[in-house]
Image (cartoon, rainbow, N blue to C red):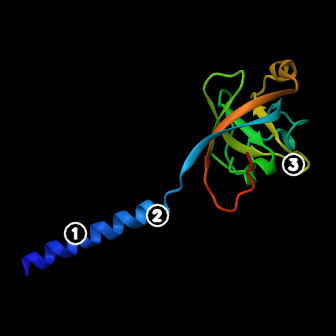
Amino acid sequence: MEPLKYILMICTTIIWMGCQQQGETEKKMVSLNVTATAYNAVEHQTKKGSRRAAWGDLLEDGVKAVAVSRDLIAMGLDHNEEIEIEGFNGTFIVKDKMNRRWTKKIDIFMGLDEQAAKEYGKRQVEIRFNKKNQPNDKFSQ
């Protein structure tokens, strides 16, 4: 009975490992040019000055968060994905989504510092992120 037990354990392990690998998605680093602006958690820019983002995350000062246009979500830049933004050190986390009227646009969260957001203004930047290879996404390079 002992050899049968070991064979069963080995077969179960092989099947489990195959399922794990099949469920994983490949990722590749992609870059995209987008329009970038900045926003603050103040009443005239958000719903009643809420610090609650579209997916329910609470945005704190100092958090490197970004809102993305919904077409970018369809391209694979979804909730909690990390992105690099030209002109900034480190990575930002996608925590918010923008109104449907915007396309190829990001909005960088700058807490309550309205002056910093005004100084940043509006510019064209390159963003980089790891895109999951999904067969039906709308990302085209």
Chain-order first, disc 2 or disc 1: 1
Image x and y of residue 54, in percent: 75, 49
The Cα–Cα distance between marks 1 and 3, rounded to whole angstroms, is: 52 Å
Image quadrant in which the C terminus is located: top right
Chain-order first, disc 1 or disc 3: 1
Image x and y of residue 137, in percent: 71, 58
Helix, strand or loop for disc 2: helix
Image x and y of residue 55, in percent: 70, 51
Q: Judge from the rendering whether residue 129 lies leftward or rightward of residue 108; answer left or right.
A: left
Q: Examine the image and state in which quarter residue 92 appears.
A: top right
Q: Which of the pair 4/140 is nearer the observer?
A: 140
Which residue is at 15% across, 72% downward? 6
The Cα–Cα distance between marks 2 and 1, rounded to whole angstroms, is: 19 Å
Q: Judge from the rendering whether residue 124 lies leftward or rightward of residue 10; answer left or right.
A: right
Name the front one of labels 1 and 3. 1
Which numbered disc covers residue 99?
3
Q: Examine the image and state in which quarter residue 82 appears.
A: top right
> How many C-alpha atoms fall within 10 Å of the one at disc 1: few (<14), some, or many (≥20)?
few
Which amino acid lies under the numbered mark 3 shown in the image of this protein? Answer: Asn
The Cα–Cα distance between marks 3 and 2, rounded to whole angstroms, is: 35 Å
Chain-order first, disc 3 or disc 2: 2
* Residue topped by disc 1: 10
Which amino acid lies under the numbered mark 1 shown in the image of this protein? Answer: Ile
* Residue topped by disc 2: 22
Which amino acid lies under the numbered mark 2 shown in the image of this protein? Answer: Gln
- Please say if the residues under marks 2 and 1 sit with CB atoms less than 8 Å apart: no
